[in-house]
């Protein structure tokens, strides 16, 4: 047994140690076989012992299996199993356990005879069971210790590897990395890049800190030592500051850096890791980029100024040319002379279009084009655009322009109508330009509807402009929307243009929330599509046709060669209750008249066959009223024009056609169809009688001055003139004018300065309308800011001048009431003395009586000077002088808590800042009264 106990301290192999114990047990029990079953998760397993015993009982005994071994394990009591008829081997089994847990079962077998297996046998097994328990426990402790040791060694190896990895990263990081002691503010561990950055050795660097290795003051004016300390404290508080900082190396060179701080976990120490990146190159690149940006902005500004100047220099002579041609066309001319003047005017307008395109393109490129949102009626808007194209572009071309607006399109939209008009004008003008004959159609439909929150719904609208023109080759489509691009040189020679129109239109469509594209086929025509995103006006109705059915049961004969126009007019007629017979030629219509009686006929004057005369005669013979559809250029109608009852001008509007039908069919409430009178003068010689105005024209260009005087004469006015701003001021001082047409750029004194002086004067204020060849938005804003009331750009169009004159219509002027003083600015002497006493006492309590007396005396001296300055500035109309003196008095009186004086001075300053000196005398009078009370109180106060 002693040998076994000694082995317990030496053996670490549990099966071998158990086998040794079992061998001694077998010797003790005189050759009986022994075995030990160790507890496992799945049951009991024999780990050592006699093969005969193990074979008899089984090597592995599961928990749900019976038998003596499992019985002892489960009960914890020793057991004797005597030999039986089946087995001549007797067994003695005892549990192996400690005080805390059961470990297994020891078995002694091969005992024969009842006397061989008695209670004494079990008692003698107890020491061996104890030794087995000790062996199992010691083996477990040993294994645990070895596992812990292995894990500790593994952790130590991982820690060494991590430290080596960190040190490698630390030393070879691209940035300078340093550890800063938060308590001392010194570096404690720099890497190699930090040594290179600062130009110091490791030992030298560990005796300084970030504040020391910096210039005394940072570029933002902060003290470097204080700033570095604040950043380190922020990192210690858990923040991760990232900031730019200027360090100074050992050679005294300043290095711009980016610094990132983070707190390091350290037992008993406040450490912060600093990553410092040299951003010298980045700073240089930023400076170069900023310089390049400034240069580009300067170049862009120079380009804008050049374009504005170019616009002015070109528009100024054009103003005279276009205006004079307009006047010339209003005089009796021969047909040849009128043709010459028309050509001249057309050429000038083409040049004006080119200038406008270049200016718009430059504004878009510079992101200076701003959109404006306004509500407008879509149907009226499109009718106006189509009318403008027809009047200015269509000429004698046998073209039909049809407009179709889908039923679900809102009646009123909210978007930039000016830019939408520009897109439509460009596309329709191109369609007219590239289409010799046939049809042009404009269709508007809804692509989608969005309802953003509580706001009005937003519509995605699709506009399609289709023509039957020359079309575009497929290999040229990619150049369609490029700037300064024509499809080929022959297009430029044949049709002209800058190639900017479509590029501008597409950019405008994109700015309106959509895009633009086109499909085309050579000799078949093109369709240009564009989309916009627009809101509908609240409570806006959908555009619907007039379905009142006023002509229900009546038969309409429609004769029009244009398929799109026939469909459009048939739709209108159906909505009004008319039954329609539609034909493309006069011959077909004559054949139809033989079979069906009609009540009214609508006939196009551009029918392709020669039988239109016969058709009109047949209709007249049958007493059928005729409505003719005629282009604006009457000379293309041909003969037979007199044979009609009503005339509707193309492009056709539904309202015009409805009125014409109602007129010829005898509707009592209908208005007679207006007949188109082309060539009528745009001048209204009765305007001066209806709107009497005394007008002054300030214009330095003699030709333009003469033009303006002639144009105004055609409206019935006799205007005075001035050649520059000084003459305009002199004329206004001598006469009361209702309106001044003021050129902006004039010698001696320009229109802006003249306007400012007029507004500052106390005399009658005329309405001032700016006339300028500058077309930039900033020019308009400058005119309005100077005090002008309206704006017309050169070349001045007759209709624009007339509109400006009509906007000058003023109501009967009632003399303005004399200026009244705001009651809140009036204070009684008692209130003023109370304020002065309270202000003085506050100074005395804070600074002492002697200092308070000095401040009060200083205030009175300064106030005396400021009051005199105010008096002189008001008398001389010096707005800047009033503003500056009032501002100074406001500040000094507020410092003494003299709030009544402070309020009046503030009111004077506000009025002068707004350019209003009308109230200044009244305010100054009250200021003098109040200041006198305050002066007497402070100056007469006992020392």
Image (tube, helix red, strand yellow):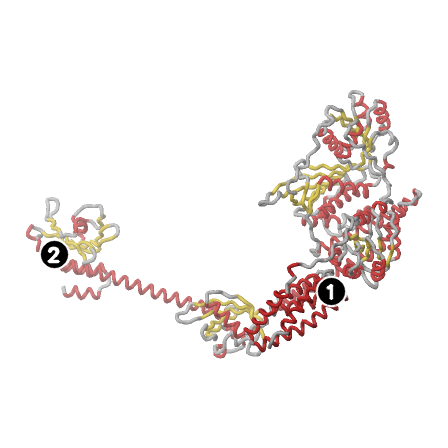
Answer yes or no: is residue 143 visible. yes
Query: Image quarter for residue 380?
Result: top right
Answer yes or no: is residue 584 visible. no
**In the depicted structure, whether residue 372 falls above or below residue 635:** below
- Most foreground residue, 269 or 96: 269
- Most foreground residue, 372 or 204: 372
418 relative to 39 in the view: left or right: right
Query: Image quarter for residue 143?
Result: bottom left
- Most foreground residue, 7 or 937: 937
342 relative to 752 in the view: left or right: right
The spot of residue 389 in percent (x, y) is 79, 42
To which residue does mark 2 refer?
31
Q: Earlier in the sequence, mark 2 or mark 1?
A: 2
The spot of residue 377 in percent (x, y) is 71, 41
> Mark 2 falls on what kind of element?
loop
Rendered-image quadrant of the C terminus: bottom right
Please name the residue shown 41% across and 71% down the image: 269
Rendered-image quadrant of the N terminus: bottom left
**In the depicted structure, whether residue 9 falls above or below residue 307:** below
CB within 8 Å, label 2 to label 1:
no
To which residue does mark 1 refer?
879
The spot of residue 580 in percent (x, y) is 75, 26
Mark 1 Cα within 10 Å, few/some/many (few <14, many 20+)? many
- Most foreground residue, 877 or 304: 877
> Mark 1 falls on what kind of element?
helix
Please name the residue shown 6% across and 52% down the image: 115
């Amino acid at each position: 047994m002693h040998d076994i106990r000694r082995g317990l301290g030496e053996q670490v192999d549990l099966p071998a140690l158990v086998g040794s114990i079992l061998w001694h047990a077998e010797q003790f029990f005189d050759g009986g076989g022994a075995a030990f079953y160790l507890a496992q998760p799945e049951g009991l397993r024999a780990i050592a012992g006699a093969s005969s015993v193990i074979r008899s009982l089984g090597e592995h005994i599961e928990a749900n299996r019976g038998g003596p071994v499992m019985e002892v394990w489960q009960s914890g009591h020793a057991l004797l199993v005597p030999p039986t008829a089946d087995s001549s081997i007797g067994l003695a089994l005892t549990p192996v356990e400690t005080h805390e847990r059961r470990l297994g079962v020891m078995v002694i077998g091969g005992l024969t005879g009842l006397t061989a297996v008695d209670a004494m046998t079990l008692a003698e097994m107890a020491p061996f069971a104890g030794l087995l328990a000790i062996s199992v426990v010691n083996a477990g402790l040993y294994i645990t210790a070895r596992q812990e040791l292995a894990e500790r060694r593994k952790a130590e190896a991982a820690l060494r590897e991590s430290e080596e990895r960190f040190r490698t990263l630390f030393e070879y990081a691209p940035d300078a990395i340093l550890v800063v002691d938060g308590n001392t503010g010194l570096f404690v561990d720099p890497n190699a890049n930090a040594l290179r950055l600062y130009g110091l050795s490791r030992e030298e660097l560990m005796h300084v800190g970030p504040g020391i290795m910096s210039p005394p003051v940072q570029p933002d004016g902060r003290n470097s030592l204080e700033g570095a300390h604040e950043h380190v404290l922020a990192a210690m508080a858990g923040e991760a500051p990232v900031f730019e900082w200027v360090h100074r190396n050992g050679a005294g060179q300043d290095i711009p850096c980016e610094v990132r701080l983070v707190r390091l976990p350290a037992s008993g120490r406040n450490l912060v890791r600093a990553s410092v990146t040299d951003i010298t190159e980045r700073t240089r690149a930023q400076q170069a980029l900023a310089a390049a940006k400034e240069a580009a902005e300067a170049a862009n500004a120079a380009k804008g100024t050049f374009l504005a100047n170019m616009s002015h220099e070109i528009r100024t002579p054009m103003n005279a040319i276009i205006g004079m041609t307009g006047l010339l066309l209003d005089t009796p001319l021969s047909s040849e002379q009128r043709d010459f003047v028309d050509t001249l005017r057309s050429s000038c307008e083409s040049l004006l279009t080119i200038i406008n395109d270049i200016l718009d393109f430059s504004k878009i490129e510079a992101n200076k084009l701003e959109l404006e949102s306004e509500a407008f009626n879509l149907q009226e808007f499109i009718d106006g655009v189509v009318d403008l194209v027809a009047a200015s572009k269509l000429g004698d071309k046998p073209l039909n322009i049809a407009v179709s607006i889908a039923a679900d399109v809102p009646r009123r939209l909210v978007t930039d109508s000016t830019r939408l008009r520009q897109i439509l004008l460009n596309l329709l003008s191109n369609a007219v330009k590239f289409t010799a004959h046939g049809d042009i159609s404009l269709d508007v439909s809804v692509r989608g509807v969005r309802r953003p929150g509580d706001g009005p719904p937003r519509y995605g609208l699709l506009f399609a402009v289709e023509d039957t023109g020359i079309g575009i080759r497929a290999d040229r489509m990619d150049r369609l929307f490029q700037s300064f691009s024509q499809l080929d040189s022959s297009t430029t020679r044949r049709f002209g243009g800058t190639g900017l129109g479509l590029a501008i239109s597409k950019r405008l469509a994109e700015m309106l929330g959509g895009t633009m594209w086109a499909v085309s086929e050579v000799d078949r025509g093109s369709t240009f599509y564009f989309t916009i995103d627009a809101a509908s006006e609240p409570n806006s109705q959908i555009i619907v046709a007039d379905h009142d059915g006023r002509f229900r049961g009546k038969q309409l004969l429609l004769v029009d060669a244009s398929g799109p126009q026939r469909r459009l007019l048939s739709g209108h007629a159906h909505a009004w209750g008319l039954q329609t017979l539609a034909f493309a030629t006069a011959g077909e219509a004559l054949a139809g008249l033989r079979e069906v009686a009609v009540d009214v006929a609508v006939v196009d004057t551009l029918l392709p066959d020669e039988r239109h005369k016969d058709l009109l005669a047949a209709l007249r013979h049958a007493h059928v009223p005729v409505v003719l559809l005629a282009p604006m250029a009457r000379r293309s109608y041909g003969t037979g024009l007199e044979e009609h009852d009503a005339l509707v001008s193309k492009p056709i509007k539904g309202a015009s056609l409805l009125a014409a039908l109602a007129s010829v069919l005898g509707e009592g409430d209908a208005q007679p169809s207006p007949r188109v009178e082309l060539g009528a003068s745009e001048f209204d010689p009765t305007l001066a009688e209806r709107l009497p105005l005394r007008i002054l024209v300030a214009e330095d260009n003699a030709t333009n001055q003469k033009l303006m005087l002639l144009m105004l004469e055609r409206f019935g006015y006799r205007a005075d003139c001035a050649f520059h701003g000084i003459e305009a001021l002199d004329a206004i001082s001598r006469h009361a004018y209702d309106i001044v047409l003021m050129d902006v750029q004039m010698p001696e004194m320009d229109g802006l300065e003249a306007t400012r002086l007029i507004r500052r004067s106390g005399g009658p204020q005329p309405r001032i309308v700016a006339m300028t060849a500058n077309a930039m938005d900033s020019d308009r804003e400058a005119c309005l800011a100077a005090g002008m009331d309206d704006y017309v750009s050169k070349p001045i169009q007759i209709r624009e001048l007339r509109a400006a004159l009509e906007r000058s219509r003023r109501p009967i002027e009632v003399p303005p009431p004399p200026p009244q003083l705001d009651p809140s600015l009036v204070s009684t002497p008692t209130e003023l003395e109370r304020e002065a006493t309270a202000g003085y006492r506050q100074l005395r309590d804070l600074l002492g009586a002697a200092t308070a007396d000095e401040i009060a005396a200083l205030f009175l001296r300064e106030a005396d000077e400021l009051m005199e300055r105010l008096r002189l500035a008001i008398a001389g109309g010096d707005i800047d002088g009033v503003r500056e003196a009032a501002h100074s008095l406001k500040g000094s009186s507020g410092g003494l808590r003299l709030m009544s004086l402070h309020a009046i001075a503030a009111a004077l300053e506000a009025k002068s800042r707004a350019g209003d000196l009308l109230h200044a005398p009244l305010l100054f009078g009250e200021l003098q009264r109040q200041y006198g009370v305050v002066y007497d109180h402070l100056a007469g106060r006992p020392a």
